[in-house]
Each structure stands twice: as C-alpha cells, then as structure tokens.
Image (cartoon, coloured by chain):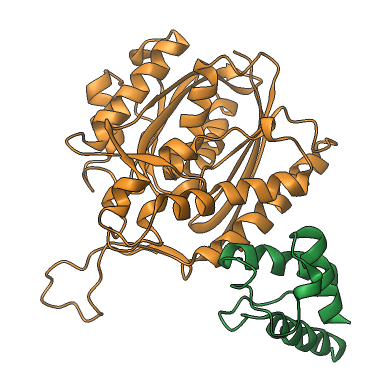
Amino acid sequence: MIKEKIIQILSEQYDVDAANLSAESTFEDMSFDSLDVAEIVMTLEDEFKISIEMSSDIKTIGDLEKHIQSKIDAESKK
Amino acid sequence: MSFNITGTGSCHPKKLVTNDDLAGFLDTNDEWIRTRTGIRERRIMTDESLLDIAVKASAEAIADAGVSASEIDLLIFSTLQGDYISPSTACLLSKKLGINCSSQFDMNMGCSGFLFALDIADSYFKSKKAKKALIVCAEAMSKLVDWSDRSTCVLFGDGAGAVVLESGNGFKDISLTVNGEYEHLYVQKASGNIPFFEQPEQKAFLKMDGQEIYIFAVSSIIREISSMLEKHSMTASDPDYYIFHQANIRIIDSARKKLRQSGEKFPVNLDRYGNTSSASIPMLLDEMNREGKLKKGDILMLCTFGAGLTTGACIIEWNK
C-alpha cells in the first residue's frame, strides 16, 4: 500500500510514468536530484503524517517504502 | 508607530562571473547550475572593498529618501564578515558618509540579517530613540566559499543593499525563529598560527548540506508565513509580493506552489546575483523600487531563512 501510494504521488505530482515504476526504480533513473528527493520526501511526510529522516541510503522507491514503514511502525508502538 | 521604508539603494561589484566562467575551472556546467538553482551569473569583488559597495548602496538609499547622512540616528550594518574584524564596518561607513550617531553597530545573523535588523529598528522607532535609520546589508561571499567546492561556490555572489527608514506605519509585524544548529550550514574561523591551539586546523570555508537546508528552508518558511497570515486574518492572496531571500529558485518555487500564488508575486534576482546572503532582500527591494514595480499601499511579505538556523517573515506596507 505504501509503495502504491508513493508511485501514485510520483506519477500525479512529479510527472513520472507509473507503468515504469517498481520497488527497484532509482530516483537517479527518474532524473531526480537530491532536492527533488527532498521535495518528494516532504510530500510523503504530509501524506503519511510522519517525519522521515533524510539519508543518502534512500536511493530507490523500495528504500523509501522501508523508511516510511519503519516510521509508521515506530509511531504505532508509542 | 514604527517605520516606513523611504529610500532604497544597492550596489554590486563590477566583475560579472557567468556559469560558463565557473565551468572553466570547476567540474560543472551552465545547464546544471541553471536548472538546479536558477542562477546564471553573479558579481564578485575584485579590487573593491566591502566598504566601497556598502557606501555606494547607502548613498543611493539616502538620496532616494531625500534625507542627509547627518540626520541618520540609527545605523545597522549586517554582514557575515567585514573588511576588518575590528573596527566594525558601521564605524567605517559612518566616517565615509558623514553619519554621526551613537546608535550604530555591525550584526551577523547570516542570510536573515536584514529581517533581524528591521526587528531591532522597530524597537528603536517604537521607543522613539530613532527617527531616521539606515540599514545596510553588504556581503563578500566570495571570500568565504571554497572555490574548489562546486557544490557551494557556484551558489553565492557579492553585493550590498540598503534602506532608509523613517517614522511611519508601514512596518506591521515580524516573526523570527531561531533554532540553534550549525551542523548543516556553517563557516568556521581560520585557526591562525596560535602555538597553544589544540583543536583540528580550521579553514574559513562555507560548508552546507544542500538537501538538509532545502528541507529546512521550505518547511519552516511555509510555517512562518502561514502563522503570520493567520495572525493577521490574511489569506495567502493578500500580500501583493512575497520577497524571498534569494538562495535558490527551487525553494521559492516550492513555497509558491504550496501557497498557490502566481509567479508575479515572487520577484527574483538570484539569476543575476546568486545568493548574496543578507544583501539579497534589500537588493531586490531596490530593484523593484527603481523599476517602479512597487505602488503605495502594496503589502509586502518579506521571507527569510538561513544559517543559525533562522527563519523570519515580516509584513510591510509600502508607503513610498
């Protein structure tokens, strides 16, 4: 569900063709630089109501999904 | 009763450095810089001193206001680094211009220096300690960046902006937020040759984590603007202009989209000057004033963010 949401936001707000996206898709392949990734992360923070710590480990859609999932899990344990 | 802005002035060094010029010695190119930052060129000091450009900007502002330098009773000089550590540049500027007031000093609040200076000026006007103030913001960023670091040196430029303030009701409100943190944006002092120094050697080069600062700038300036609008029962469409600190066009675009306002409300000069730190807002104000873009009654929302980390929003009604 998180991955699907990420792909939906990328295609609706950032003009990326959803048909080509998977967990392995890298932001570099989508021609996003570090500020684009920051912008996407901020949009997802609003969407999922969490705060994501920026990290150079976030290179693919799958990485982003894992970060968001672990934040949601941490929040629900509180 | 606080102040009106009654005069503006600006000055940039004569040397123009294009992105192609930088590509001559850095592993970068015009397209990369332009698309990622919006900057095409910047002005860099060669044989001018910071005082030279500050004097010119100040003289313009004083002439624009139709006052004389001897009437100035408050001088605030905002800069990251003057030509001298001591004496303060305010003292040197006063001598050059013929200003004789005791309320004068330098201040350093990074890129947000102009708004912090306006906040101080507001206090002086409200306490009636000042009737005619000169605020000068002058920056020699070229002396602080590492010219071998393509991630930072391409972003900054040199310049000076000045405003004259006189008693009036143009200044409406200001909100400034400080979140003390240096990790992602700082300039250390050079360590010198002290024989007793026990820390690692320091070079006076600006260091910045662009991604972290982008996130900070965009999220915090939107919070600052939204709170200010709400406090005054305004909507985002009420300000006639949002005058942003000119750091990166993508920060301005991101904020503009979140506020859902048209591009004409977000004037820009970073394409021609790069990030001139605290000088950027007064330089832009001067440009808009000279080009006749500001009309009496216009509501300006000045928006700033920078090293500190700081953010600020200030509502001023243009009464000139």
Which residue is the extreme one toward the front?
A: A19
Residue in front for this viewpoint, B30 or B193: B30
Identify the residue at image location x=38%, y=17%: B60
Instruction: Tell me, yes or no, if residue A49 can be seen here.
Output: no
Point out residue B286 in the picture as x, y percentages from the top left corner: 48, 23
In the rendered image, residue A18, in percent from the top left (x then y), is placed at: 80, 70
User: In this rendering, would B58 be left or right of A57?
Assistant: left
Identify the residue at horizontal 54%, vertical 22% (top origin).
B288
Quarter occupied by the C terminus of chain B = top right
Quadrant hosting residue B204: bottom left
Residue B119 appears left or right of B14? right
Q: Position of residue B267 (x, y in %)?
A: 59, 32
The quadrant of the picture occupied by the N terminus of chain B is top right
**Which chain corresponds to the colour green?**
A
In percent of width and height, residue B59 lies at 34, 18
- Residue furthest to the top in view is B66
In this view, the residue in front, B259 or B304, is B259
**B141 or B268, nearer to the observer:** B268
Q: For residue A45, which quarter of the picture?
A: bottom right
Name the residue: 47% across, 71% down.
B183
Up-down: is A10 above or below B54?
below
Shade of chain B as shown in the rendered figure: orange
Horizontally, is B50 left or right of A8 in the view?
left
